[in-house]
Structures are given as C-alpha cells and as structure tokens.
Amino acid sequence: MFFIQASLILIELFLTKQAVQCNKNYPLLVPQSRDLSEPTVIKHDTSYNCFIASRVVITRERKMQPIQRLQCLFTVFSGAFLIPYILFLIIAGMPLFYMELALGQYNREGAATVWKICPVFKGVGYAVILIALYVGFYYNVIIAWSLYYLFSSFTFELPWTNCHNSWNSPNCTDPKLFNASVLGNGTKYSKYKLTPAAEFYERGVLHLHESRGIHDLGLPRWQLSLCLLVVVIILFFSLWKGVKTSGKVVWITATLPYVVLFVLLIHGITLPGAYNGINAYLHIDFRRLKEATVWIDAATQIFYSLGAGFGVLIAFASYNKFDNNCYRDALLTSTINCVTSFISGFAIFSILGYMAHEHKVKIEDVATEGAGLVFILYPEAISTLSGSTFWAVVFFIMLLTLGIDSSMGGMEAVITGLADDFHLLKQHRKLFTFGVSFGTFLLALFCITNGGIYVLTLLDTFAAGTSILFAVLMEAIGVSWFYGVDRFSEDIQQMMGFKPGLYWRLCWKFVSPAFLLFVVIVSIINFKPLTYDDYTFPLWANRIGWGIALSSMILVPAYIIYKFMNVRGTFKERLAYCITPENEHQLVAQGNVRQFKLQHWLTI
C-alpha cells in the first residue's frame, strides 16, 4: 500500500534512535536483547497522498484502500469530525499503540515470531507478511510515477501546463481559459479530465486511453519500466544489509518530507484564496455528528493513522532497552502524530482554496481523493506559481523520498518476517533480498501497462483493506484474551517498574477488540463494487479481489488447524500447547494451564 503514514516517520526516527542505544547484556530473567545486525521488521501502511492530505481528511465513501484512505474532503468540511477522531484516539488508538510497543520491547521479536506468547496465533504474523508482499507488487509503481514526474519537471515549462503536447486530446482545455461555465451539468472541477494536468497523468503517464478496461492491459510502458527498475535498485541497496543500510537511509527519507511539507505549508498559506480553504477545513457543523459516516470514518482513520498492527511498532520496540519507558513513547508519539495530521491539513486546504479562487469555483468542487490529489491537483496548482519548476522538483523529491521510505518498510516486513522463521534465508539475506526485490519488480509490471491503473486499484482496494483489519483484530484478541491482560501487565511492570492503570487494561481487553470488530464489520457491510472514475470493474475482477483478501485472512485459521494437528497428545493437551506460551510448556505436562481456569478469562 503506498505511503506509510507520516506518523510512522516520527516513529521510525524516535524508535530507531532508541534501537541503536540497545544494551545487549540483560540478566537471564528477562528476554535477551536482539542482535542489532539483524534487520528490523518494518510495516508501513500508508497511502501515498496521506502525507499531503491531512490524516483528518476522510473519504466520504469510506474506501479503506491505502491510496484513498483519508481524502474525501466533504467530511472534513464538518470540523465536528475531530470530536469522534479524538475520542477514538483515546479509547482505541493509544491503547493499541501502547500494547504493541510493550509487546515488542518485552519479547524482543518481530511480528511473526513474537507469537511465542501464544503459538496458535502465529498465522496472524504470516498474514501480515503476505499482505506486505501483496502491497509490494504495486507500491513501488506509485514511487515510479513520482520519479517520472520528477524527471519531467526539469524543464523551463512544466509539461502539464498546456495542451500542445503529443498526448493531449483535441478537447483539452487551456486552464487560462477555464471558468465554471466550462463544466456544465453539475460536473465538479476535480472530475474534469480534460485539463492539461489530468491529461498528462492519464494520457501522458498512464496511457489509460489506450485500454478498454482491466481485461485489456497491453504491454508495460518502457518509460515507467525504467523508473520502476531504478526504484527497485535503490530499495535493494537500501535493504540488503538490514538496519546497517536502511537505518542510515531512513534519516534522509524520513526527515526530508517534513522539511518540504513545512516549506509548502508556509508558501501555501500566502496564496490568494488560501484563507477560504483553511476556513472550510476548520468549519464546525455539529449536525454532522448525527451521520454514522463521520463516526465510521473517524474510527477507521485512527486505526490507519497510528499504524498499530502493521509490524513496525513491535519490531522497532524490540530493539529498545528492556527498561525503556514505552508508556511515555506511546503517549508522546501518538500525540505528535495526530498533531502533525492536523497541521498537515492546512497545507492541502490552502492549495484547495487557491485552486478554487483561481478557477472561480467552490472549494468542494476542487476537492478530490486518491492519486488525483497528488498527481493532478497539486501539480496543476504548482504550475501556476512563480518558479513552478523549482516547486515541482521539491514536491516530487518529497514524494519520492517518502515513498522509498515507505516501501523499505513493507519489503523489510517480508524479508525479516520470513528470515526470522527460516534460518536458510537469514544466512543468505542478500540473495533473498534480491529475490524479493526482483519478484516485486516483475509482478509490478502488470501495473505499468496501459490498463495498469485498474490492476493497481484492484490490489490497493483488496490487498490491505479488510484483511489487515482482521489480522489486527486477531492480534488484539490473542494478546488480551489468550495471553492475558494480567500477564501482559506483569511483563510491563517487569520492564518499567509499574503496572498499566485500569483504564489501559480495560481498553486492551474490551474496548480495543470491540473497536476493531466494529471497523471490520463496517468495512464488509459498506463494500461497494469496485470502480475507477466512470469505469465499473466486472464481477470476476471483484471476485479476484476478494480472493486476494481472503488468501491472507485464511492463514489465521489455517495455521490454527496446522498447529493443532502437529502437536502430540490428547485433544486437551494439544489445545493447551497451542495457547500456552512456549516458555511455559513444561506447565502443560504438569496439568497447570492458566487458560483452562475461569480466573484467567475474568482477570483484568
């Protein structure tokens, strides 16, 4: 999925710094420190334009795919959205964040092998790894688009500023001659596909006009193939030695986007019409609180914003000092994340206000979502500024570094997750890294054909939507109920000298699982047949999409069956070995199984 949410960049910097300070000499009574030469499991779940559009901008149709996770600007026009957003942050977001930091720090393991605390749930780790692999098939394609745009920006006149190019259609409309009357029939400006910027993206880059649908893909575009190859090569050399290389690269890829965003924000608020955009962003309409969509969007956004459940928190925390105050880290980092989300909204809405002012239309008419925001609207806005070439280069360098940073995490999740379980892969890490990189390159070629955007949209919708929500729900149940909140609290006390308060324990055991179950059910109920603009995907494409989603979710029950069938003993003994932490298996032989006692399930 494209774009590890900007919050996770802060997490990377904060926790990576903690990681390099890790003390390896712990007493035997605590889990031993990990070798820092081993790679870190990093899972970035983000959409590519989330960093540009504020994390508090939510899609009205509430699609859960990475590129369209928080963008429909109608919801934000009701500033009342912040009320459920903050509520869900407190009752679900922060508790899950805290839980994963503590889980990784105590057990010193990544997302898959951390399930030594409850072996039967190891399928959750494999599900996350498979999801990361699926995302890698198309994630790098959007980085390749950014690289293509970056190369195209090194001109005196940006190629998406006029209609005199070979890819333009006869109906292309010069933006200087554009006004509201051109739209007609109630068409929004954001849906008007005859502007130079829209045609450059869909006809010049994607060549979408040469495809009739997902059944008519065509051959890969050689220009995008070269860009994709460059991206994969960069990723390979950033990952082949684990944290020895990726830990250094991330200091550039993680900090530069923040610097550029700050520059764009300062410049954006000085543009004419910016005030109107910001006013729309902050406007509060309490009547919107009556709409279920607002609450659903807020719940969904909190989950994706903090990134709990994607592996990155557990993995980075596993490199912390054993007595590190992860409670402080959870509160500080999640708060900074949400504040950053709020502030970044000013950058996008100042540009929306400026575009509405320039074209004399309403702000909601220029509001868009998904790739259209990043590759059409923002480039068009940049092209109207003085020194447009400079601003375009800066903007796409930001997207490029941000995308590489994100993709490093997703690929590392696959590489490290499998290498931790299969020592042969760990012994040949460089070769394995090359295999993963080359494999994702080959499969990504389907996404850079004439109809590649349809394949990308399909993967973006199904690969990491309901499936990742389901995986995190299982994670919360595994830790809070099967491993036990009381035992988990004792682990935290052993690390930091104090137990979590009653509030956190209640959230872990009841509120957070209920929150995740709610989001999973809603994501299924609210599903609509897949579309891309005016194109409706055929039924067979939707079935393939659900097959992709189920292929990762099925690993959870499949591993439960596998584990149960491969343990010797009676039915009761098998069950006991499956749900008892590996370091307590001797208690099973003694008949002392905590999970077989009612107190275990009732204790908070």
Image (tube, rainbow, N blue to C red):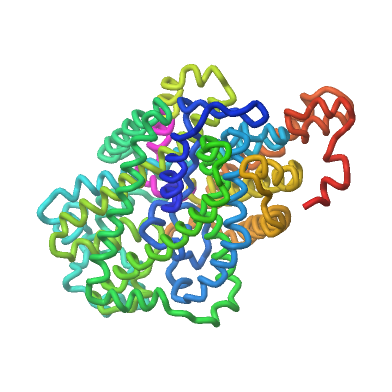
Q: Residue 571, how many percent across, how many down?
A: 88, 30
- Percent x, y for residue 391? 20, 57
Q: Is residue 525 left or right of residue 139?
A: right
Q: Residue at x 31, y 53 (%)?
A: 209
Range drawn in magenta: 438-458
Q: Main secondary structure of the magenta part?
A: helix
Instruction: Give the side of residue 286 with respect to residue 586, left or right.
Output: left
Quadrant assignment, res 376? bottom left
Residue 455 within the segment the image draws in magenta = yes
| Residue at the left extreme of this rendering | 156
In this rendering, is residue 256 above or below 127?
below
259 in magenta: no
Count of residue discs: 0
Residue located 68% across and 32% down the image: 116
Can residue 214 be seen at all in this image of the molecule? no
Quarter assignment of residue 375: bottom left
Residue 173 in view, yes or no: yes
Q: Which one is in front, 148 or 308?
A: 308
Residue 166: give x, y in percent of width and height: 17, 52
Residue 108 image point, x, y percent: 58, 33
Q: At x 74% / y 41%, what residue is drawn?
A: 483
Q: Is residue 137 above or below residue 171?
A: above
Nearer to the camera, 90 or 126:
90
